[in-house]
Structures are given as C-alpha cells and as structure tokens.
Image (tube, rainbow, N blue to C red):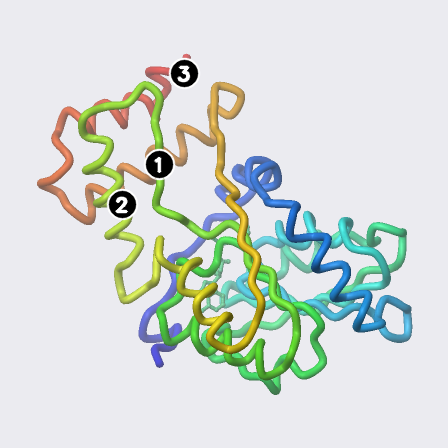
Amino acid sequence: MSSVSENPPPAFDPGWLALREGADSEARATATLAPLRAFLRGRGGGTRERPVRIADLGCGSGSQGRWLAPRLPGAQRWTLYDVDPGLLSLAGAYLPAASEDGSPVSARMCLRDVGTITARDLAEIDLVTGSALLDLLTYAELERIVRAVTEAGCAALFTLSVAGRVELFPGDRDDLALTEAFNAHQRRGGRRGPEAADTAEWEFAAHGYRTLSRPSPWRLGPERVPLVRSWLRGWAEAALEQDPGRPSADTWNAASASANGGNWA
Ligand SMILES: C[S@@+](CC[C@H](N)C(=O)[O-])C[C@H]1O[C@@H](n2cnc3c(N)ncnc32)[C@H](O)[C@@H]1O
C-alpha cells in the first residue's frame, strides 16, 4: 500500500474549494439521502447522549459537512479527517452548529492519511463520507477504505468523484485530446482518477454491500464566470503538463483566452 509520504495528494487551495462550493452543492445527488436516512434511523442514534457519528474522509475545508449536516436529523458528531492541517481547521471551524431538526452538531479533527484507515478506527462510526476524494486515491487505498467500512458495518456516502467526461459548448476539435490528457494526469502515481467511482462501487459490491450511484455533473455557464475561468485554466494546464505535445498550441491559446475572459466578458 502506498502512503501519503510516498505519494502525497496535491495541495488544495482553500480559495479554489470556496469557489467551487456553490456548484458542488447544486451538483450533489439528493436521491441517496432517503436510503441513508432510513439506515441511520435503523441504527437508533441522533440523541445528545448517542449522536449520529459521521467520519468525513478528506474533508478539505468542510464543504461536505456544510451540505450534509443540515440535511440529516438528530444530534451529530463529526470526525473530520485530512492531511492538510490548514484545511482541517477551516472544516472544524465552519461546520454547521445544528442539524436539520436543530439538534447539536459537534466536530473533532483528525490529521490523518485516510489511506491507512482501519475498521477499528471506524468502530463507533455510523456513516463514512467523502467528497471529491475517491479519484485521488490509489486502488490499494480505496480497497483499504472499503474494507474498513464494510468490516465496521457502517454506511458510506461518497460524492463528487471526477468522472472524466467534459462537454464544452461551443466544442472544439481538440476537446477530446485535452480531455484524454487531463484524465491521464488524474491517473498519475497510480491514482484511480476517472475510474474511481466505478472501482469503489465494484469493491463495495464485492464486500456484500448494496450500492446506489447517481450522476452529479457540474453545469457551468455564464453565471459562474470566476469558477469557469479557474477550472478551465487548471484543466488545460494539467492536460498540457501531462502531454505537452498533444493539445495543439491553438487549443492551449483558446483555452487560456477563455480562462482569461475571452468568451465570458
Ligand atoms: C478535492 S479536495 C475535497 C475537499 C472536500 N471534501 C470538498 O468536497 O470540498 C480533496 C481533499 O482530500 C484530502 N486528501 C487527499 N488524499 C488524502 C489522504 N490520503 N488522506 C487524507 N486526506 C486526503 C486533501 O488534502 C483535500 O483536502
């Protein structure tokens, strides 16, 4: 198994995470919430003495908690995991104080490589969640997390994994080459990249879990110009870093122009 020190995850700028939080929130699939609530009801938690216990893996600055905590009833105690201490403290500071029905929500922070998590760590957890995380993990890390979750017997909700599909309007003849180069970049260091969600679903099923997966695409238009610019710049830069010769100079210039406001002024 690889560890963070051998294969460190990319650093995530809190400004970038804040910029995408609104689009992420709109994209999140809500169909998974009803079965999740039913499962948690069956576990019997939600009181002050016995809160619902949730582990957020790779919490970043905490956008999953800000979205999910107010959508689940009952008292909740979140354990937030990340390898970035700055993001971790933001997540702890900005977790909502109340759940859907006004019950208290508390948090503790854990500076930890989630690729090393075990069933023992999750022994008192009802729900393991993670958002925009799976694609950053190697197969061994993903398999270990699935094993830990299934041995502990908790529910899992993993959201917003990179799926590798991009449609640009208007399209360009080099869009496919850029997409392929970006997807290859996502797979660097053995990460699952665009295959991560399918891998996780397969692994959970192999461990006897019933799975439910729903699409959660970003739909970005002129109402999200700063996010489009920032995403497009990062997307094209990653593609070019992966395959400097493949996307043509024209493509790169067009992407840069769009990112700098050429098509969105
Ligand atoms: C794309 S950000 C997503 C953050 C947040 N979950 C969200 O949805 O905005 C990925 C986060 O996972 C963390 N991360 C990646 N690999 C990790 C690992 N092996 N152990 C702990 N945290 C990890 C990163 O530090 C980063 O905060």
Callout 2–callout 3 Cβ contact below 8 Å: no
Of callouts 2 and 3, which one flags the residue occurring earlier in the amino acid sequence?
2
The answer to which quarter of the image holds residue 198 is: bottom left
**Residue 259's x, y, as percent?**
34, 26
Q: For the residues marked 2 and 3, what is the alpha-carbon distance in whole angstroms? A: 23 Å
- Distance from Cα at disc 3 to Cα at disc 1: 18 Å
- Considering only order in the chain, which callout, 2 or 1, is on the residue closer to the N terminus? 1
Q: Are marks 1 and 2 in contact (CB under 8 Å)?
A: yes
**Which residue is found at the position 52% from the left and 43% from the top?**
216
Q: Which mark is residue 182?
A: 2
Mark nearer the viewer, 2 or 3 = 2
Residue 51 in the image: above or below residue 235? below
**Residue at which label 3 appears:** 264
Q: Secondary structure at mark 1?
A: loop
Q: Residues within 10 Å of mark 2 (few under 14, many from 20)?
A: many
- Is 139 on the left or on the right of 240, as rendered? right
Identify the residue position indicated by label 1 in the image.
166
Q: Secondary structure at mark 3?
A: loop
Compared to residue 198, the image places residue 242 above or below, namely: above
What amino acid type should be assigned to the residue bearing mark 2?
A: Phe
User: In the figure, is residue 233 to the left or right of 83?
Assistant: left
